[in-house]
Image: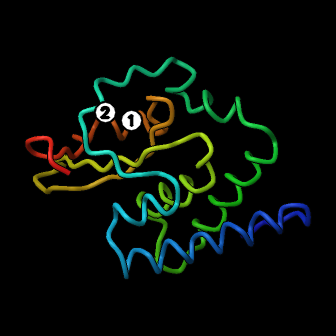
Amino acid sequence: MIRAVPPREWPAVLAAAGVALVVEVGLRVTTLPRLARLVGAPLRLDSGGDLMPSSSERLGTGLTARLDPRLRRRLRSARRVLRHWPFGDTCLRRALVTGYVLRRRRPVLRVGVAKVDGRIQAHAWLEVDGVSLDPAGAALYQALETIGGER
């Protein structure tokens, strides 16, 4: 059952739907590095060192607890839109739309791969201030890096 959206959240939901639509088109017509820069979460392809999130960040409360209510409402709206997105709620779509919402915090997009049950799988997540917003994913997946320092 879909809960009714409170009237004060409609502007944020509509804005999130617009961003999701731009991301959807971008995934089909441009490169990932260009789309990631466009939404304000550039793709990072360097090692970045080991991320050592605090216990509150491991629990997922570190960043959101420090955000103002308006920004938290925008993040909630983005999650709500993507849960019902007709093209799927993939980690890449979530990271790009969330990256746009958090763009003033200067997030970076990470993409990684892992071998799970004999198959190669990919995952995308955001980092803000050197902290992964998906510590479990960041621990399981090896982040992609450029070879020989080229970009």
- Front residue of 67/87: it is 67
Task: Assign the N terminus to one quadrant of the image.
Answer: bottom right
Q: Which residue is mark 1?
A: 136
Horizontal arrangement in the rendering, residue 55 relative to residue 115 (left or right)? right
Horizontal arrangement in the rendering, residue 79 relative to residue 150 (left or right)? right
**Residue drawn at (31%, 33%) of the image:** 139
- Front residue of 4/39: it is 39
Horizontal arrangement in the rendering, residue 100 relative to residue 115 (left or right)? right
Is label 1 in contact with label 2 (beta carbons under 8 Å)? yes
**Residue drawn at (49%, 26%) of the image:** 58
Compared to 64, does 120 lie above or below? below
Which amino acid type is shown beneath numbered disc 1? Ala
Q: Which residue is mark 2?
A: 139
- Front residue of 117/93: it is 93
The image quarter containing residue 28 is: bottom left
Q: Secondary structure at mark 1?
A: helix
Which amino acid type is shown beneath numbered disc 2? Ala
Tell me the crowding category of disc 2: few under 14, some 14 to 19, or many 20 or more residues within 10 angstroms, Cα based: few
Q: Position of residue 7 (x, y in %)?
A: 91, 66
Q: Secondary structure at mark 2?
A: helix
